[in-house]
Image: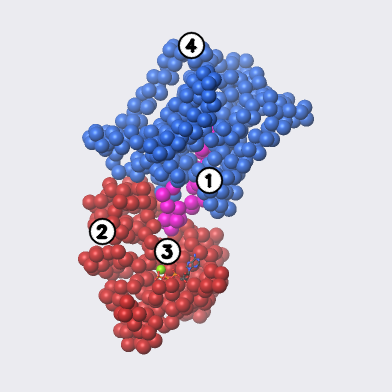
Chain colours: A blue, B red
Amino acid sequence: MTVLGVNLRNWETWGTILVGIAMVVLLFAGPHIFDLFLLFKVTLFVAMAILALSMGFIWGYGGILCFGQSAFYGLGAYTYAIAVGNIGESTAPFLLAIVVPGAFAALLGYFVFYGRLSDVYLAVVTLAVTLILYNFMRSTAGEEYVIGAQRLMGFNGISSIQPINWPGDGSAWLLPDEIFHLAMFCLIACYFGLKLLNRSHFGRVAVAIRENELRAELLGYDVRLHKLQTFTIGGAMAGLAGCLGVNFNSFVNPDVFALNFAAEIIMWTLIGGLGTLVGPMIGCIGLLMLKFEIGQQQITNTYLIFGGIIMLFVLLVPAGLLPTARQLGERYLPMLRADGAGDGRGREAAQ
Amino acid sequence: MTDAATETTSGTATGQTAGAVPILETHGLTMRFGGVVAVDDVDFSMAEGELRCLIGPNGAGKSTFFKCLTHQYKASAGRVRFRGTDITGSHTYQIARRGIGIKTQVPSVFDGLSVHENIWVAARRHHGRREANRIVDEILERLRLEGHARRVVGQLAHGERQRVELGTVLTGEPELILLDEPTAGMTHEEVNQTTDLIREINRTTSLIVVEHDMQFIKAIAERVTVFHQGAILIEDTMANLEKNQQVRDIYLGKQHAA
Ligand SMILES: Nc1ncnc2c1ncn2[C@@H]1O[C@H](COP(=O)(O)OP(=O)(O)OP(=O)(O)O)[C@@H](O)[C@H]1O
Ligand SMILES: [Mg+2]
């Protein structure tokens, strides 16, 4: 049963349609069902979900384990803050917050992939870069650290960052519900953009490279270039997330480069499920909600709980939530069987 | 890397006419791993359209020779020429694009993807979407894999995975195919089918086949190159090699005893 090239007897097709409907409903209903405080929070969640998508893409599909995906988020956030502090109109800063982290990812990726460093090195190098950025940004409190008109403010962070405005009019700032709409729109665009990309030649090759780099090379694919492109797309998307993230509370500080945050992104992806796009988003929202909850109770340390959760998952649900749900669904609802696409399988958590 | 710049003048040694340029040539090809010389000063040459068999005991350097040809290993010394063009410094993917396909000794496939996707990814590198789909169907039929099209390759038997790998190689219609132990792990019937398949491929393509199965080699071989301790020991027809005492000692004798 195929309509317009889309297989309707496929678990994944229905999943995509459902997710799409849910996101569009949220896009329009959000400002009506959430009060202002909640709307801010949900906007942050949406930005984080874009970050989770970027990680789910490069790791789950591209097979690239980047331990410092948060660095691109942080770069996007700081780029926006610094650029808007100088320019005052947000269109160029918004675009720069995508381009600068993307370019940085390309540069980093160039050294790692063209230097033929192993996968473990990429994880180590990206983590090291993140921690260097953390320590550097923390040390920029002095007045000498200034880019144009914008001081970097060190560990205090940059506050009162001007929000995104309607393109062309630097004084027409977006209202909270408009920023929510924008974030939601970006999330939907990223999700469906990645869906299309994954179905394209480029996306199929990315997965093939994840499965076997040597075979991809032996068939004539330039693996280094391909991984570089995948990594750059992920970096740019994380930058976009960072830009939307600072618009949630007009504030950014060096904690975006902290080890905690870097590790959280890995946890979202592992818990939600590698090799899916929705999985990392679910993992992200779930853990963020839990974190807020624990933070309010103030009875125990957040990361103690997170550590316990990740251990439970590695032991009990190693494939992650979504792939496991899909396996169960395929077992008990056999009419919705994925048509052999390999990335429907859960991937080993250790990979 | 431009083709024209690296065009060679080696034609003088091997004959002037274009038709006489060997499809593959190596000069002094050497691969050392620390103290081990896995490939030792190999001068190899084969003509276009040839089906060459490569035999030799375990550890003779056959697989390493293939890996040097496809630049999976960077040779310690020596040159490789493909259809008169020096490809010694080319990357693996560039060599593949020039028209050398390889089936490795340990099957190298995309284990997590379906049979169909494996071959599609290979075919799509050369062709548009529609043409790629057509070629996938053609290859699936040719390799009798239609029944397995939607199955994940990692779950198939060894012999079937070998066929999938060969399928991915065939999509690009390479001009030279290197087969490293294509019948390993195959049933008797599969070996016979592979024999026919290799003969059929050889109608349009040059081949180098590494094998241990002597029955199989006798069935397909024209000319056989014997590797021993990284070097070419002798090159002759199978019938002559069977009479050769030196070859029997280092290779055939051991095989029969084993
Ligand atoms: N990566 C490597 N590092 C060190 N030594 C190696 C490496 N690869 C191969 N060798 C050595 O090179 C020699 C040739 O190995 P090779 O695999 O090419 O033999 P072969 O003729 O293919 O044998 P077989 O018939 O068992 O496949 C062996 O002594 C092997 O131990
Ligand atoms: Mg071998």
Q: Residue at x 49, y 52 (%)?
A: A222
Q: Is mark 3 within 8 Å of ligand 2?
A: no
- Please give the label number shown on residue A269: none
Spatial separation of the CA atoms under disc 2 and disc 4: 63 Å
Q: Amino acid at mark 4?
A: Asp
Which residue bears the numbered disc 3?
A: B100
Q: Is residue A315 left or right of residue A81?
A: left
* SS type, badge 2: helix
Q: Which tag, 4 or 1, sits closer to the chain's start?
A: 4
Q: Position of residue A81 (x, y in %)?
A: 64, 26
Spatial separation of the CA atoms under disc 1 and disc 3: 25 Å
Question: Which chain does the numbered disc 4 sit on?
Answer: A
Q: Position of residue B15 (x, y in %)?
A: 47, 80
Q: Amino acid at mark 1?
A: Leu
Spatial separation of the CA atoms under disc 4 and disc 1: 42 Å
- Please give the label number shown on residue A35: 4
* SS type, badge 1: helix
Spatial separation of the CA atoms under disc 1 and disc 2: 36 Å
